[in-house]
């Protein structure tokens, strides 16, 4: 397997993780509207899923940028939640 296909495979794995997290987030939000809210454990899990999603998207953007500029995408790293959550749009 060459570097490009390895990087693409890793990106696909990150996207699979994103899709699973999005599905869980949707299920929690749907449960919230059906039940007029979530319990404390479910609220904490929803917040955790939201943060993890932000981290995954950030990691994928880092990997794509490194690839675009001829750098090694494997040097991209998951950033801490406070850093990712502090970004301004």
Image: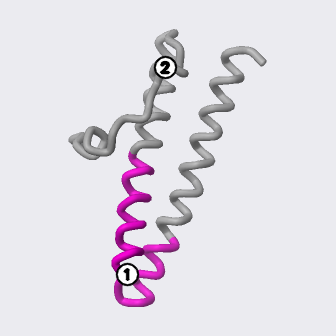
Q: Quadrant of the N terminus?
A: top right
**Which residue is the extreme one toward the right?**
1
Pick whichever, 51 or 5, lies toward us: 51
Q: Which residues are magenta?
A: 27-54
Distance Cα–Cα, label 2 vs label 1: 38 Å
Q: Which residue is mark 1?
A: 38
Q: Is residue 81 left or right of residue 67?
A: left
Considering the numbered disc 2 on the image, is that residue within a helix, a strand or a loop? helix
Residue under the point 39% across and 47% down: 54
**Which residue is the extreme one toward the top?**
70
Considering the numbered disc 1 on the image, is that residue within a helix, a strand or a loop? loop
Place of residue 65 in the rendered image (x, y in percent of width and height, measured from the top left): 45, 22
Q: For residue 78, what is the image quadrant? A: top left
Residue under the point 51% across and 9% down: 70
Q: Is residue 86 left or right of residue 56?
A: left
Res. 72 mark:
none
Res. 75 mark:
2
Place of residue 17 in the rendered image (x, y in percent of width and height, measured from the top left): 58, 49
């Amino acid at each position: 397997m060459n570097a490009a296909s390895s990087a693409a495979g890793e990106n696909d794995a990150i996207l699979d993780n994103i899709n699973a997290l999005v599905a869980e987030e949707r299920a929690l939000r749907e449960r919230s509207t059906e039940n007029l809210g979530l319990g404390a454990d479910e609220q904490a899990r929803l917040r955790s899923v939201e943060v993890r999603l932000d981290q995954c998207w950030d990691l994928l953007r880092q990997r794509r940028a490194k690839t675009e500029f001829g750098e090694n995408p494997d040097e991209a790293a998951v950033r801490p939640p406070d850093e990712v959550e502090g970004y301004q749009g």
